[in-house]
Image: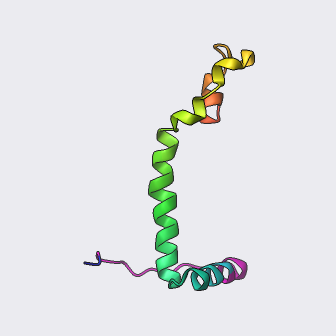
Amino acid sequence: MMPTLHRTQVLLEPRHYQALKRLAREEGLSLSALLRQILEEHLFQQQGKEQHPPLSTLAGLGRDPSLAGRDHDQALYGHKA
């Protein structure tokens, strides 16, 4: 069952519109379906990745003496606290 959808208008630059139309055609999706997919991935799936980086990103950190107790936020999250 399709969830309730809300109609909205979005103003796009011509280059964004053309790129989206091309990608939608290549993916076999409507422009609306493609935009919903992009929003879903950006707003919800990436949000979880930022909060919980995979453990594989930590592999080998102990071998780098420059990270010994310093700048762990930079190494783990990409920014300093």
Q: Position of residue 74 (x, y in %)?
A: 65, 29
The residue shown at (51%, 74%) is: 35
25 within the magenta span: no
| Foreground of the two, 7 or 2 | 2
Q: At 56% across and 80% down in the image, what residue appears?
A: 27
For the point 54% across and 78% down, which residue is it? Answer: 10
Q: Is residue 81 visible?
A: no
- Region rendered in magenta: 3-18
- The quadrant the C terminus occupies is top right
Q: Where residue 22 sits: x, y (%)?
A: 65, 83
Q: Is residue 70 above or below residue 41?
A: above
Q: Identify the image quadrant of residue 13.
A: bottom right
Q: Residue at x 63, y 13 (%)?
A: 69
- Prevailing secondary structure of the magenta residues: loop
| Left or right: 11 in relation to 40 | right
Q: Quadrant of the N terminus?
A: bottom left
